[in-house]
Amino acid sequence: ETTPAPVTVVTLGDARPSRFDISLEKPLSFFEFLPVIASACAFVGCLAVSDYYMALVMLCGILANGVSGLLLSSMTIALKRARAAEGSPPGDGLLLASKGVIILKGKEDSVNGITRGRLELCFRDDIETDKPIPYLTITRPTLYFGICSFLFTLQFLMQLIFLIQGTTFGQVAFLTSLSVAWVQNFLLTSPEK
């Protein structure tokens, strides 16, 4: 017995360059600065009540998140496509969806961009260059991820050591700034209806 499934046929146009930027640029809103403002207020509040342990934890979190955001925002996501051989005939691709099939029709380059393409994290000035990277080479993205990992590990260790030594006010201020950041991340990543 067979089950009927929808079939979608997509005709693709001309291919884009073999590597192109797909990140979205949008202006920052006040809503995105809310966790920074909450953390800064908690930091100042901890300094005001002389809770230096919690102020140090807050400052480390602000610096770790700020530096990591700065480093990672200088990178972009790019789609790298496999190049088709010259003179190749029009290609077709097949994608299996959860409840159906998608058939891709068009030039081989266009179909390869979807069926065999891969996403890369690279710098904006590296998008146009398509040079191969030697094996075991420390690239800027690798170095930046290492710096971010170190900063977040340091932040985790400082929270583990100093959080229990803070005052009740400092701990409540820390949890408040953490919950503001959690709510903001939840709302930003929730799917739009």
Image: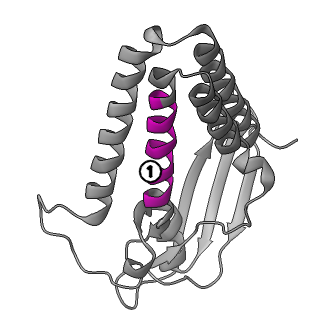
Identity of the residue drawn at 17% across and 61% down: 138
Residue 149, percent from left and from top: 33, 41
Based on the picture, tell me whether residue 171 belongs to the magenta stretch: no
Q: Is residue 133 left or right of residue 118?
A: left
Which residue is most to the bottom? Answer: 87
The amino acid type, in three-letter code, at marker 1 is Ser
Quick check: 174 above or below 109? Answer: above
Main secondary structure found in the magenta portion: helix
- Residue 76 in sight: no
The residue carrying mark 1 is: 68
Instruction: Point out the image quarter for the N terminus.
Output: top right
Based on the picture, tell me whether residue 58 belongs to the magenta stretch: yes
Q: Which residues are magenta?
A: 56-71
Identity of the residue drawn at 61% across and 8% down: 168
Identity of the residue drawn at 64% across and 14% down: 169
Neighbours of disc 1 within 10 Å: few (<14), some (14-19), many (20+): some
Instruction: Point out the image quarter for the C terminus.
Output: top right
Residue 147, percent from left and from top: 30, 49
